[in-house]
Structures are given as structure tokens and as C-alpha cells.
Image (cartoon, grey):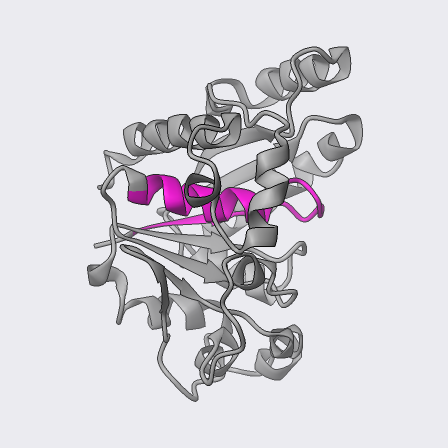
Amino acid sequence: MAIVISLLNHKGGVGKTTSTINIGAGLVELDRRVLLLDLDPQANLSLSLGVGRQPTTLYEALRGEADLAPVNVRPNLDVVPSTLDLSGAEMELINEAGREYILRELFEGVRDAYDFIVIDCPPSLGLLTLNALTSSDYVMIPLQTEFLALQGLAKIKQVIQKVKLRLNKKLDILGVLPTMYDGRKVLNRDVVETIQKYFGHLVFDTYIRDNVALAEAPAQRQDIFTYNQSSPGAEDYLNLCKEILERTQVKA
């Protein structure tokens, strides 16, 4: 039975999609079977892995027109692609009974085929994100190590707590992931110190360093391990995935 992890931050540009892709690929490097779910209408995850428009996407599945249709991108790594049509899904599903649980029901047909399902949430706190949280075991919060990225952290934590209370009792915060980190910058170090005071042990020991290879890999439609396995980005995400395995073993 797959462990489901949502990557959530309603601020854009914090490394959420990059982290979703490379956490998935890193878990594959550690011999796990992984399904990535592109829940963002911008479809950046699908594009970054070279998955073009498919006959069946997440949009059709959420509308009840089809089951989830994973696309294989490398051995043991599959993707359920997104499409711009997904941007209209929130309005179209607003009157559906049990609309918060649609994604959870869709996962029932695939959870036994994977060890992990990793969800790239949209940069908003709407119905799509609510579906992700309702169907997840854990939430990860990627956080760019800059001052503005700290704004809204309390809101994210509040939303997670409300979902846990009302919709998904098993939901927990897996950790906060500092991204685009440069230890030479005082600001980056100060931001990490601030989030450690706020989240304590939930902050991952691994920080994702600012690394050009992480920006180059999507242009080649590859994850960081396929693009440059010796890069600092690959090292960081592999270490992060080892931490994830340690933190999730209770529910494994």
C-alpha cells in the first residue's frame, strides 16, 4: 500500500515541482516504486519529464470520465499528467457530493502498485489542494530560504490542522524542506534558523542547495539523477529521500 505525500506551498517559485520530481526519482534510486501526480494546471511537472498531452489526464479522472492513467517515464517511475483544463476543475466539481474525497477514491485503484505516491500541489489552497490533503498520509512544505517565503507559513499550518481535524485524521506534516540554500548568505542562514524555531524537529536535516543542474535538468526533460548524478542537487535529493524513508517507516 503506497504512502501518499503532498508537497504544498501556496507561494510559487519555492522549488515544489523540482522537489516532487526529484524526490520521486530519488526514491526510485533507493529501489522504491513511485507514482508522481501532477495536480497543478500549469502542468510543469509533466512538461519537465517530457510527458506530452495524453488522451487521459488527471482532469478526466477527477471528472469521473476515466480511471487514473499513469505514464511511465523511467523504470519504476510513473506520472499522472496534468493539463490546463484542470484549472476549470474546481468550478466544475464544486457541487459534487463528496468533492473533497474524489482523489482519495481514485487512488484506491493504484495504491497497491506503488510504494510512494508524491503529489505536486497547485500554488493555491483551493479544492484541488484540499483533495490532495484529504488523500495524503503526509505533507511536505518546500520553503525557499528567503524572507518573503516565510510569509504565509502560519496559514499553511492552519489549513493542514483543519484538514486533519475535519477530513483526514491520519494526516501529518512530514517535514519542512529548505530549498535554494546558499550557506554563504547570511539571509539564507537566518531564514533556516527562523523556521527551525517555528517547526523544530520537523525541519529536514538536508537542505537543497542552490545548484544550476537542478535548473538545467527540466530543460532536458529529465530528473536530476538522469541528468547529472554527480551534481550537488542529486546528492541533496538522495540524502533527503533517505530521511523520508526513515520518517515514514512507521506507516510503511
Residue in the picture at 23% in, 34% down: 250
Instruction: Tell me where the magenta segment starts and ends, as one range.
Output: 3-28
**Residue 203 image offset from top left, x and y in percent:** 51, 23
**Residue 49 image offset from top left, x and y in percent:** 50, 58
**Residue 242 image offset from top left, x and y in percent:** 33, 28
Residue found at the very far right of the displayed protein:
148
Residue in the picture at 61% in, 83% down: 92
Q: Is residue 9 magenta?
A: yes
Q: Is residue 58 left or right of residue 180?
A: left
Q: Quadrant of the C terminus?
A: top left
Q: Is residue 47 left or right of residue 67?
A: right
Q: Is residue 125 left or right of residue 176?
A: right
Q: Quadrant of the N terminus?
A: bottom left
Nearer to us in this view, 216 or 210: 216
Q: Is residue 138 visible?
A: no
Nearer to us in this view, 16 or 163: 16
Check the image and report above or below for 90 versus 37. below
Residue in the picture at 66% in, 40% down: 14
Check the image and report above or below for 211 versus 152. above
Check the image and report above or below for 117 versus 238. below
Residue in the picture at 60% in, 65% down: 43
Q: Is residue 238 magenta?
A: no
Residue found at the very far bottom of the displayed protein:
65
Number of marks in the rendered image = 0
**Residue 65 image offset from top left, x and y in percent:** 43, 89
Image-quadrant location for residue 27: top left
Nearer to us in this view, 138 or 123: 123
Check the image and report above or below for 167 versus 16. below
Q: Is residue 216 visible?
A: yes
